[in-house]
Image: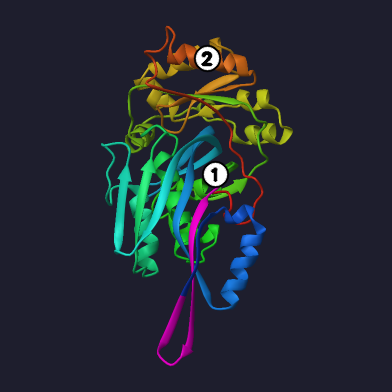
């Protein structure tokens, strides 16, 4: 969902070189949920009235990999993958402000995050603003909740939200598909973060096939106090000789999703990158074991790690597992612990899921 702060101005040339500006109002609207406002804006545009979006609030949702397989390495360094992706409710909050001063300004709540071109959110704004020659500026306020360098696409989902927001704010008119085509230039996970929900991801991550929504359940997320480099993990995997049984059953996972059986889905968990990361950091396996002992249907590392997630069909068990990792005898295993659920597309029109 997003909230828009609108300034609507009416400009009519009534006489030669005479411009009359009438400020019609300054109000906060949730445009997508108010059909009257949409109709009003349509009529205003017909009369030559421009609607200026000056403020957007966005939610950038994290993801987990229910299954992840690596098929090979391309000459350009990218890897061909097959993954089952799932959006979760844990999200970052982003606010965009339109400014008269040109340029991009980025603020975050974490002092160690870059606030320049090294940040994907900054580069996402720059990509669109440079392509379309936007003369005004944008101020981005990013509040992080998704663990950093955790295998949950935190940077990619922030970039996806900024692409969506800049497109809306400056009226660039791009569809979600067109945003995906641009987003993949910045990161392989960005197209999925624009689409969200349950999906099969192929190619380098940009070939997406929507899948049926997975039955809702509790998702426990725990990140140990370590960070890993995705690049290093993939390079380490390249040096390994994988056996057939090391590869997850992606097709079997899809069949389980189609049957809507959460126990079958959890039984098909598999992440080939865990061979690298968990092999180096035993704490990953220890967290998984705690989750299973506390009643998780299954637990696994997400992405290149080191974050671990567990699925629970019993809310009481999920809460108990959360408290064990957050406050109990296992609290030293994880630095960040969150209890959330799946986030799925709501069937809105193109782009309304933000």
Q: Residue at x 61, y 47 (%)?
A: 209
Q: Nearer the viewer, residue 124 or 209?
A: 124
Which residue is under mark 2? 321
- The residue singled out by tag 1 in the image is 201
Q: Measured from the top left, where is residue 115 in percent x and y?
A: 28, 47
Q: Taking 315 as reference, is 146 left or right?
A: left
Whether label 1 touches label 2, CB < 8 Å: no
| Residues shaded magenta | 1-21
How many neighbours does mark 1 have within 10 angstroms: few (below 14), some (14-19), or many (20 or more)? many
Q: Is residue 240 above or below residue 165?
A: above
User: Does label 1 or label 2 sit earlier along the sequence?
Assistant: 1
Question: Residue 102's image quarter?
Answer: bottom left
Residue 349 % position (x, y): 64, 56
Q: Nearer the viewer, mark 1 or mark 2?
A: 2
Q: Who's the residue at 40% across and 90% down the image?
A: 17
**SS under mark 2:** helix
Magenta region, mostly helix, strand or loop?
Answer: strand
Residue 117 image position (x, y, % from top left): 28, 52
Given residues 288 and 109, the one toward you in this image is 109
Name the one closer to the observer, 202 or 347. 347
Q: CA distance from mark 1 to mark 2?
A: 30 Å
Estimate how packed mark 2 is, as few (under 14), some (14 to 19) or many (20 or more) residues with alpha carbons within 10 Å.
Answer: many
Q: Position of residue 284 (x, y in %)?
A: 42, 19
Assign a secondary structure to mark 1: strand
Q: Is residue 178 left or right of residue 278?
A: right
Residue sitting nearer the eye, 258 or 101: 101
Check residue 305 for magenta coloring. no
Q: Residue furthest right?
A: 259
346 relative to 84 in the view: left or right: right
Residue 76 visible in this rendered orientation of the protein:
no
Q: Any mark on residue 317, and which?
A: none
């Amino acid at each position: 969902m997003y909230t828009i702060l609108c300034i609507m101005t009416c400009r009519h040339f009534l006489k030669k070189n005479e411009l009359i500006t009438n400020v019609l109002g300054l109000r906060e609207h949730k445009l997508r949920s108010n059909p009257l406002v949409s109709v009003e804006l349509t009529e205003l545009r017909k009369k030559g009235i421009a609607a200026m979006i000056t403020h957007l609030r966005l939610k950038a949702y994290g993801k987990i990999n229910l299954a992840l397989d690596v098929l090979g390495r391309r000459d350009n360094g990218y890897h061909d993958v097959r993954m089952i992706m799932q959006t979760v409710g844990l999200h970052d909050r982003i606010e965009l402000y339109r400014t008269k001063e040109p340029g991009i300004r980025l603020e975050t709540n974490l002092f160690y995050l870059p606030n320049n071109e090294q940040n994907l959110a900054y580069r996402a704004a720059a990509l669109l603003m440079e392509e379309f020659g936007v003369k005004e500026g944008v101020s981005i306020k990013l509040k992080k909740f998704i663990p950093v360098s955790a295998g949950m696409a935190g940077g990619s989902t922030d970039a996806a939200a900024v692409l969506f927001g800049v497109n809306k704010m400056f009226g660039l008119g791009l569809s979600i598909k067109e945003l995906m085509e641009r987003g993949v230039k910045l990161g392989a996970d960005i197209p999925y973060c624009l689409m969200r929900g349950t999906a099969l991801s192929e190619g380098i991550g940009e070939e997406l096939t929507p899948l049926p929504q997975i039955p809702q359940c509790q998702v426990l997320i725990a990140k140990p106090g370590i960070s890993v480099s995705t690049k290093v993990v993939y390079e380490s995997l390249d040096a390994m000789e994988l056996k057939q049984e090391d590869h997850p059953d992606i097709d079997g996972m899809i069949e389980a999703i189609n049957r809507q059986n959460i126990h079958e889905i959890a039984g098909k968990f598999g992440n080939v990158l865990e061979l690298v990361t968990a092999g180096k950091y035993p704490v990953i396996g220890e967290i998984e074991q705690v989750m299973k002992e506390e009643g998780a249907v299954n637990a696994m590392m997400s992405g290149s790690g080191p974050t671990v997630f567990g699925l629970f069909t019993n809310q009481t068990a999920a809460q108990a597992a959360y408290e064990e990792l957050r406050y109990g005898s296992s609290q030293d295993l994880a630095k960040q612990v969150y209890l959330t659920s799946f986030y799925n597309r709501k069937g809105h029109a193109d782009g309304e899921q933000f």
